[in-house]
Image (tube, helix red, strand yellow):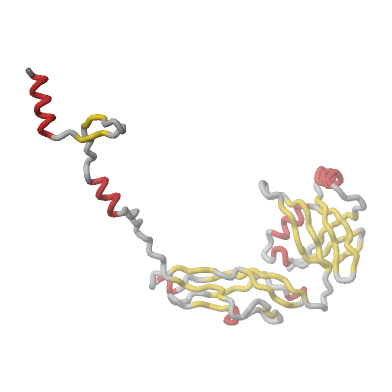
Amino acid sequence: MPEITVPAEPRSETGKNVNRRLRDRGLIPGILYGISKSPVPVAVSPKQIGAILKSASGENTLFDLDLAGKKRKVILKEFQVEPLEGHLLHADFYEVALDKVLHVKVHVELHGTPVGVKTQGGILDFVTRELTVECLPADIPEKIVLDVSSLELGKHIRVHDLAPPAKVKILTDPDLVVAHVVTPRAEEAPVAAEVAPEAAAAAAEPEVIKKGKATPEGEVAEEKPEKADKAEKREKK
């Protein structure tokens, strides 16, 4: 991989207004720090940092930060992105010693289509997508590749099944599942709402409105059918 050098300017002022002026010049604020070293505020080009992030090794890319003519070997430790448009807002650089091991996170990339998906109707579940590894700065892998072609339905691959590159030690829990093939979940039929027997009976039986006359207590007394028939005959006469 060709050497990458990113020019950086030292900055003595901080704050929102200063950062705004930096962005007007096409720069973003950043911090350079390392073990036993005081943090140094810097300003860098977001385009150059963006190009590094889009490279194969991404934020684990080892490059030179050229600060006032002095090159420092660094990796991107953290960065902030504007949530709506994705513009870089800030970057932190960690100065490394080439002879001292680092702990970094590396992405896992799956290759192939599992036999459990091809012929057994399963679904591939990618569980652990990133691993913590230990290695020297020059040995940081771009990614850890896992071939899942032979993975059958109901089977899984754990961290201890992986074969990391030479000089790279995986620190993530070895029993953690990286990927497995699972049976698709059957869609459950909607369950009809349960209706109480009393409510069902009430709904099935038509409501009967009874005729009657008022009593002194204000209640309605039900008329007997015979009296109701006589009253009808008198009205007809």
* Image quarter hosting the N terminus: bottom right
Q: Is residue 52 left or right of residue 226?
A: right
Above-or-below relation of 55 to 145? above
Q: Position of residue 60 (x, y in %)?
A: 72, 67
The image quadrant of residue 233 is: top left
Above-or-below relation of 63 to 227? below
Q: Residue furthest top?
A: 237
Q: Position of residue 120 (x, y in %)?
A: 38, 73
Q: Is residue 148 left or right of residue 227?
A: right
Q: Which is nearer the eye, 41 or 74?
A: 41
Number of marks in the image? Answer: 0
Q: Give the residue displayed 82% in from the left and 56% down from the top.
A: 30
Q: Residue furthest front?
A: 216
Q: Give the residue displayed 82% in from the left and 44% down from the top.
A: 20
Q: Position of residue 94 (x, y in %)?
A: 81, 66
Q: Which is nearer the eye, 58 or 172?
A: 172
Q: Which is nearer the eye, 199 or 152?
A: 199
Q: Give the residue displayed 74% in from the left and 55% down from the top.
A: 80
Q: Give the residue displayed 75% in from the left and 52% down from the top.
A: 47
Above-or-below relation of 59 to 192? below
* Image quarter hosting the C terminus: top left
Q: Position of residue 139 (x, y in %)?
A: 73, 76
Above-or-below relation of 167 to 32? below
The image quadrant of residue 184 is: bottom left
